[in-house]
Image (tube, rainbow, N blue to C red):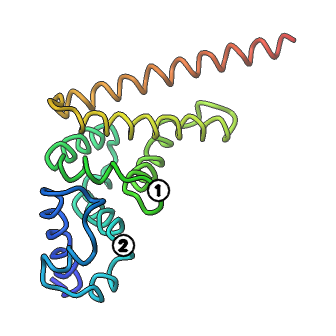
Amino acid sequence: MPDSLITKRALASSLKELMKAQPLTKISVGDICEKCGMNRKSFYYHFCDKYDLVNWIFDTEFSEIRNRPDHIANFEDICEYFYSDREFYRSALQITGQNSFRDYFRMQIHPVLKELVGNLFDSEEDTEFLVTFLADGTVSTLIRWLNSSDPEPPEEMARRVRRTMVVISQAIVTTYEEEERKAAKE
């Protein structure tokens, strides 16, 4: 294993350990480095900030699943993955703004949702709006689920989200088609 990967994993492990005791907002780069016996220079050689490290953790731990062609199964795997490490992701998803994991995750699911939505609309603008709507809703739903004191099993959450996306998409398409027919008659 290359030295840089060993360093990154040590930093990731330190951050995950620290996040068991305190929220990400209270953890500094200095805390992460102290926990694993590295200096800040080593940290900044590999990562821009602690949020970049959180994104790297997600990318590294979830890379095999993301590359599979079955996006529906992928979503169930995302739920399983977040559930298995929910303390970490509960904290990571609370952060908003520049370099936040919430925005990063939203960007990661955006192309998957766009592929699932396909060409429901003639307009790219309408398609983009629907995909953004679904991505925002998915992220918010996952946050609410992870913050629940007794979250339902991951497979049930995945089933609910999939079913809701299908119903919303069908309703939007039906409404869109009706509006198009009305506009054509006028």
Q: Is residue 13 above or below residue 159?
A: below
Q: Quadrant of residue 112?
A: top left
- Identify the residue at image location x=65%, y=35%: 126
Indicate which disc, 2 or 1, sits on the residue closer to the N terminus: 2
Mark 1 highlights which residue?
Answer: 97
| Number of numbered discs overlaid on the protein picture | 2
- Across and down, in percent, residue 182 comes to 77, 11
18 vs 8, nearest the viewer: 18
Q: Quadrant of residue 51?
A: bottom left
Tag 2 and tag 1, C-beta contact below 8 Å: no
Q: Residue type at mark 1?
A: Gly
Q: Residue type at mark 2?
A: Asp
- Identify the residue at image location x=59%, y=16%: 174
Mark 2 highlights which residue?
Answer: 49
Q: Is residue 142 left or right of residue 84?
A: right
- Across and down, in percent, residue 96 comes to 42, 52
Q: Is residue 21 left or right of residue 163?
A: left
Which quadrant does the C terminus fall into?
Answer: top right
- Across and down, in percent, residue 44 comes to 34, 83
- Identify the residue at image location x=53%, y=17%: 171
Which quadrant does the N terminus fall into?
Answer: bottom left
- Across and down, in percent, residue 143 comes to 31, 39
52 vs 184, nearest the viewer: 52
Q: Residue furthest front?
A: 26
Q: Is residue 73 above or below residue 55?
A: above
Distance (Cα) linking label 2 and label 1 = 13 Å
Q: Is residue 183 above or below residue 33?
A: above
State the SS at label 1: loop
154 vs 103, nearest the viewer: 103
Q: Is residue 129 left or right of residue 87?
A: right
